[in-house]
Amino acid sequence: VLALTKVILIPFTLAIFISLIYAPLIHFLERKLKLPKVAVLLGSVTLFIGIFLLVSVFIGHSIDSFVSGADQYRNRLTDLTVKSTEVSKQLGFDIDKENIQKLVQSFPIAKMIKSVSGSMLGLLSNTFLVIFFTIFLLTGDSARKSEDSTFEKIKQSAGNYIQTKLITSSITALLTYIVLAFFDVEMAFMFSILTFLLNFIPNIGSIIAVALPLPIVLLQYGVGYQIILIFSLLISAQTLIGNILEPKLLGESMGLHPVTILLFLTFWGFIWGVTGMFLSVPITATLKIVFDKFEFTKPVSKLFSGEF
């Protein structure tokens, strides 16, 4: 059912998480500033569309810039390969230089970049359907609510988790962009957006986010001090945010066992593709919060934590 109805369920799930982020702001503007709900909703939708269009334009510009210089990077890759084969021969390894050069020349760099960017833009597809669902969720959400109800406690806990991840992922993405832009790395903006998305996947996402720009840096600068500096700065940013800032903001860890994360990452990736992989941990964390609130399902919550 999840696989067959993913066209509707993926935008709906995204809308749920967006509404959990927006709801506290809308309630604040309603109660404190006495603004009408319609005006607040229209402002929120306009902001969301504006951010989406801005991100799409920047990603498109980054891709066009890189693709236009793809031949130049292919030549640099060829030069790097030639140097590598020469070093290998000195070390006693017999490698056919001509075959390696032919392989590099036929390497579809531009196609691969477009494939990665296409997967990323796939996360932002069906935007208007997401906005449509979000508006209805926010319209039905009342500022006057019972703080003691289990449902509100679940919403508050899940909302806090999503908002914290949003803040920490945004800071990490900003630091990544500053580092890559300082060294004039191509597609710095696209890599920062990927870092933002990948940081929703604990451990594995951070490793991928650090590793993704390195091939481009290698093509631009070759083997030198730049790649070491960039690699060190990106690791430092991930460590600072992931191991120091995020635990302090969350107060306590979600307590998801690494095996649980891996299993749900595989499951949601199989069901919903790349989008499912990005949504897997927020969905699992929310399920754990729900299961933890009821005595009957607490054993399932403990199972998520690795308590057998």
Image (tube, helix red, strand yellow):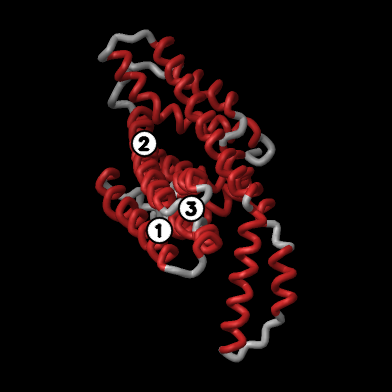
In percent of the image, x 55 and y 62: which residue is there? 219
Q: Nearer the viewer, mark 3 or mark 1?
A: 3
Residue bearing the label numbered 2? 163
Residue 302: in sight, yes or no? no
| Nearer to the camera, 211 or 308 | 211
| Nearer to the camera, 249 or 227 | 227
Residue bearing the label numbered 1? 306
Q: CA distance from mark 2 to mark 3?
A: 30 Å
Above or below residue 256? Residue 53 is: above
Q: Quadrant of the C terminus?
A: bottom left
Amino acid, disc 1? Gly
Amino acid, disc 3? Val
Q: CA distance from mark 3 to mark 1?
A: 41 Å
Q: Locate residue 61: give its quadrant.
A: top right
Amino acid, disc 2? Gln
Q: Earlier in the sequence, mark 2 or mark 1?
A: 2
In the drawing, does residue 223 fall left or right of residue 159?
right
Report the label total. Answer: 3
How dense is the environment of label 3, judged by Cα within 10 Å: few (below 14), some, or many (20 and up)? many
Secondary structure under the numbered disc 3 in the rendered image:
loop
Name the residue at the bottom extreme. 92
In percent of the image, x 27 and y 43: which residue is there? 249
Mark 2 and mark 1 residues within 8 Å of each other at the beta carbon? no
In the drawing, does residue 151 fall left or right of residue 110?
left
Residue bearing the label numbered 3? 185
Residue 99 is situated, as x and y percent measured from the top left of the image, at: 74, 75
